[in-house]
Image: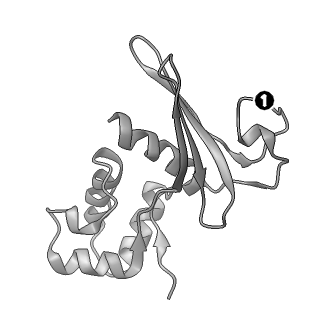
Amino acid sequence: MAKTELIGLSKEELGAEIAAIGEKPFRAKQIWQWIYNRGVTDFEEMSNLSKDLRLKLAEHFTISRPKIIAEQISADKTHKWLLEFADGQRIETVYIPEADRGSVCVSTQVGCAVGCTFCHTGSQKITRNLTAGEIVSQFMVVRDVYH
């Protein structure tokens, strides 16, 4: 049985997945908070869930990030990641710091028609759109570093 990736599911979709394994709807809210508020990728860390439930979640689901192939931080503190998804396709995600906040540039496709020379994604021809989970997981990589 293939496990379902939880990153990128809407709250409603997460609720449906949790209900499908026989759990009460409020569990979805707890899991959502662990994933997005705390950045947890291991069910074992979800300490307000029973051990049995954590094992059950691990049997059915995953919480993953793309593989970081390379990182680069420039003099102005702009942080770039070259990320690889499960199918081997690569894109670039960038965090641009500002005085009172930061901006995140995420890719929505493998490849880009704009062709910016400073961006890995722009150096590739468009081959496919990214899934919601792949788009959200880019932000989660940045969140892991800057939270």
Residue 15 lies in quadrant: bottom left
What residue lies at 21% left-to-right and 62% top-to-bottom? 46
| Disc 1 element | loop
Above or below, comparing residue 134 to residue 56 in the picture: above
Q: Quadrant of the C terminus?
A: top left
Above or below, comparing residue 127 to residue 146 in the picture: below
Residue 52 located left or right of residue 43:
left
Above or below, comparing residue 120 to residue 89 in the picture: above
Above or below, comparing residue 141 to residue 12 in the picture: above
What residue lies at 55% left-to-right and 56% top-to-bottom? 133
What residue lies at 37% left-to-right and 39% top-to-bottom? 145
Where residue 104 appears, as percent x and y from the top left, is 53, 31
Q: Which residue is mark 1?
A: 116
The foreground one among 135 and 71 is 71
The foreground one among 20 and 113 is 113
Residue 84 lies in quadrant: bottom right
Where residue 59 appears, as percent x and y from the top left, is 36, 82
